[in-house]
């Protein structure tokens, strides 16, 4: 169940909900920043940064500079307000360990909870497949183009890579935290260097023409789902909030908003900075060729620019970004898969063996990720037609619906940001319909 007023902690002798506390006293009583918060910021950044630097430049750059300007203006507020809404859904539930799958059942009932949990799983699970495909293509390109090796059989290379990334996750959160810390800081430094280093290669003349109004609208419309996908750390937001509820109690919602805000700021600076630099360096034609090659843009840059250090740095950035994002989405994917089984066949306190369920879900995810890596589907097509719109449903529309319907979330109603997030979510979801039109 969600909280009833009598069960809430008290402030000054008066029972108060987390939503009431945040909206009434949030500005005056923001918790101080700690090393614990920094570790979560790095985890959220690592979860989202992979898609943003690997695929967004291709999609955003194809439309020219003007749609890219609109995307740059919109994505920071979109990211912050949407993830804050999802966190608010989780923070208002009484049990400190209830994640988004359990929250959905408590808010909307068993049937709707199952449906929402399935959609949540489907918003994250394809991303795991996308990263399995991407890391296979990236390592294969590195071996053939940069190291001069004979290509390995795709089934073998993909199996080794998928098992290696999965093994880190299965080993436990402590190892994941250590590995993430090792790779995200160098990734940020490498991105900053690459953004500046690409400036001499910018092709400003190729982006100078103002597109026709129809082309401009369609470019913006189609880039929104990829923006949603590229800046999403929804897979880790639920676990972030659960962790903060245990540590910060009533102030968990305020702390979550603080961490999410700075994650959105850093993501926007580094990801959109790289998108602009890469798009201007390659030009629209280069972006189209990168799409056709089904390669991350960093790897494509390494193949096209005759710079020895970039031939190693480019694929290295791609591999690190894929790995960090894979870790974050793995957590959400397993959470969603376990939630589907628990919500459908039992509860966490029932007779279902959680260990068997968890390893069964892990086995399913590893096997299907390997199969996807072998089949090598178009990554951007998956993002545009499936992942982006489904993420928008879970990250943008579901929290706004919950705020409108659920009593305990009532203090969050009436905000202008709610309208903004709803419109952005509807645009992203409608992108799947537009993308299917001839």
Image (cartoon, rainbow, N blue to C red):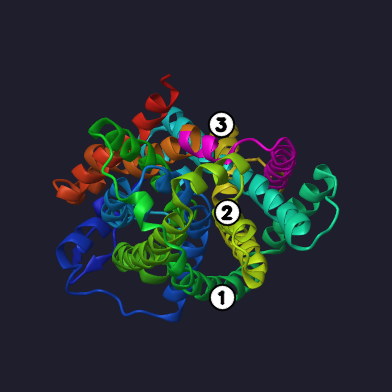
Magenta stretch holds residue 50: no
Task: Kindly indicate the quadrant of the structure image that contains residue 350.
Answer: top right
Q: Does 403 appear above or below 174?
A: above
Q: Which residue is mark 1?
A: 186
Residue located farthest toward the top when viewing the structure as drawn: 438
Compute the Cα span from label 3 to label 1.
42 Å
Q: Which residues are magenta?
A: 357-384
Q: Residue at x 31, y 63 (%)?
A: 257
As rendered, which of 150 and 359 lies closer to the eye? 150
Q: Which residue is mark 3?
A: 344
Q: Position of residue 161 (x, y in %)?
A: 75, 54
Q: Main secondary structure of the magenta part?
A: helix
Q: Position of residue 248 (x, y in %)?
A: 36, 70
Examine the rendered structure and indicate whether residue 358 appears above or below residue 398.
below
* Residue on which the image places disc 2: 331
* Chain-order first, disc 2 or disc 3: 2
Frontmost of labels 2 and 3 is 2
- Say left or right for 409 vs 152: left
Residue at point 32%, 64% (across, down): 261
């Amino acid at each position: 169940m969600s909280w009833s007023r009598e069960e809430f902690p008290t402030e000054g002798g008066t029972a108060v909900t987390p939503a009431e506390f945040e909206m009434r006293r949030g500005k005056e009583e923001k918790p101080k920043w700690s090393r614990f918060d920094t570790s979560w910021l790095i985890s959220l950044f690592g979860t989202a940064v992979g898609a943003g630097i690997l695929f967004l430049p291709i999609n955003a750059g194809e439309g020219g500079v003007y749609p890219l300007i609109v995307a740059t203006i919109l994505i920071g507020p979109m990211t912050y307000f949407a993830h804050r809404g999802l966190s608010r859904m989780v923070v208002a539930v009484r049990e400190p360990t209830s994640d988004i799958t359990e929250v959905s059942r408590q808010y909307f009932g068993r049937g709707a909870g199952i449906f929402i949990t399935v959609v949540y799983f489907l918003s994250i699970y394809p991303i795991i497949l996308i990263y399995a495909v991407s890391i296979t293509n990236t390592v294969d390109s590195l071996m053939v183009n940069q190291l001069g090796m004979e290509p390995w059989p795709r089934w073998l290379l993909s199996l080794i890579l998928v098992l290696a990334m999965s093994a880190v996750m299965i080993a436990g959160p402590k190892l994941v935290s250590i590995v993430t810390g090792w790779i995200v800081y160098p990734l940020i430094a490498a991105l900053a260097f690459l953004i500046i280093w690409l400036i001499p290669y910018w092709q400003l003349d190729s982006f100078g023409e103002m597109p026709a109004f129809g082309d401009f609208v369609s470019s913006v419309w189609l880039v929104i789902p990829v923006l949603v996908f590229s800046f999403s750390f929804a897979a880790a937001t639920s676990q972030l909030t659960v962790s903060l509820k245990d540590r910060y109690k009533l102030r968990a919602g305020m702390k979550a908003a603080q961490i999410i805000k700075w994650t959105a700021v850093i993501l926007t600076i580094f990801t959109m900075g790289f998108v602009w630099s890469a798009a201007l360096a390659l030009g629209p034609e280069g972006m189209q060729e990168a799409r056709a090659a089904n390669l991350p843009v960093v790897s494509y840059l390494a193949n096209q620019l005759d710079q020895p250090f970039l031939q190693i740095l480019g694929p290295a950035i791609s591999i690190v970004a894929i790995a960090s994002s894979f870790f974050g989405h793995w957590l959400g994917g397993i959470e969603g898969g376990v939630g589907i089984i628990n919500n459908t066949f039992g509860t966490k306190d029932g007779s279902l063996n959680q260990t068997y369920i968890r390893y069964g879900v892990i086995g399913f995810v590893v096997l299907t990720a390997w199969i996807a890596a072998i089949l090598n589907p178009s990554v951007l097509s998956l993002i545009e037609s499936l992942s982006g719109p489904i993420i928008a449903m879970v990250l943008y529309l579901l929290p706004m619906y919950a705020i409108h319907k659920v009593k305990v979330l009532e203090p969050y109603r009436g905000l202008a940001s709610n309208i903004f997030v709803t419109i952005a979510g509807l645009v992203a979801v409608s992108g799947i319909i537009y993308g299917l039109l001839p």
